[in-house]
Image (spheres, rainbow, N blue to C red):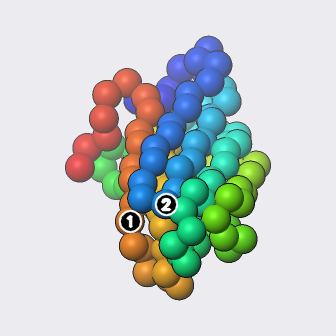
């Protein structure tokens, strides 16, 4: 669980067909975290790429909104945001990176950070 306010930085990263990305969570607490990251389109396949933050409060996984990069092969999107969840907490933090066709996910990867893996 990511609950130690003394923890400086956590990084989640993954690669899928046509895309890779990373999110950094700086000094996360159980209820709030600043988020910085990027997603890169690394295939000339006609698909766009996207990245999103995911969190789990040990019973429910929350899928936050997608951030899309439509520029094509070789382009990247940098994001700076934050997340607050006072209803269930941010006990586990992670990301999903996807190659997409419209709103349909073509390929996806997921990475979690914290001590251990979140419940399925």
> Residue beneath label 1, please?
107
SS of the residue under disc 2: loop
User: Is residue 34 in view?
Assistant: yes
In the depicted structure, whether residue 23 falls above or below residue 105: above
The x and y percentages for residue 97 are 49, 56
Residue at the farthest front position: 44
Q: Residue at x 41, y 43 (%)?
A: 111
Query: On the image, which quarter does residue 57 sit in?
Result: top left
Residue at the farthest left position: 120
Frontmost residue, 104 versus 41? 41
The x and y percentages for residue 35 are 67, 43
SS of the residue under disc 1: strand
For mark 2, does the 10 Å Cα neighbourhood hold few (<14), some (14 to 19), or many (20 or more) residues?
Answer: many
Q: Residue at x 34, y 55 (%)?
A: 60
Q: Residue at x 37, y 24 (%)?
A: 115
Q: In the rendered structure, which disc, 2 or 1, sits on the residue that comes first in sequence?
A: 2
Residue at the farthest top position: 6
In the depicted structure, whether residue 37 falls above or below residue 105: above
Query: On the image, which quarter does residue 50 sit in?
Result: bottom right
Instruction: From the viewer's perspective, tell me whether residue 106 is left or right of residue 23.
Output: left
**Which label is found at residue 18?**
2
Instruction: From the viewer's perspective, tell me whether residue 92 is left or right of residue 27.
Output: left
Q: Residue at x 50, y 40 (%)?
A: 13
Label 2 and label 1: CA atoms lie apart by: 8 Å
Q: Are marks 2 and 1 in contact (CB under 8 Å)?
A: yes
**Which label is found at residue 45?**
none
The x and y percentages for residue 100 are 49, 74
């Amino acid at each position: 669980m990511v609950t130690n306010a003394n923890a400086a930085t956590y990084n989640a990263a993954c690669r899928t067909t046509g895309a890779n990305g990373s999110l950094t969570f700086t000094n996360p607490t159980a209820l709030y975290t600043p988020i910085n990251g990027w997603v890169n389109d690394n295939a000339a396949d006609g698909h766009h790429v996207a990245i999103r933050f995911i969190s789990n409060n040990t019973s429910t996984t929350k899928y936050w909104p997608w951030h899309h990069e439509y520029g094509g092969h070789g382009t990247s999107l940098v994001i700076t945001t934050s997340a607050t969840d006072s209803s269930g907490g941010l006990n586990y933090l992670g990301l999903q990176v996807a190659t997409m066709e419209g709103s349909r996910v073509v390929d996806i990867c997921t990475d979690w950070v914290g001590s251990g893996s979140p419940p399925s």
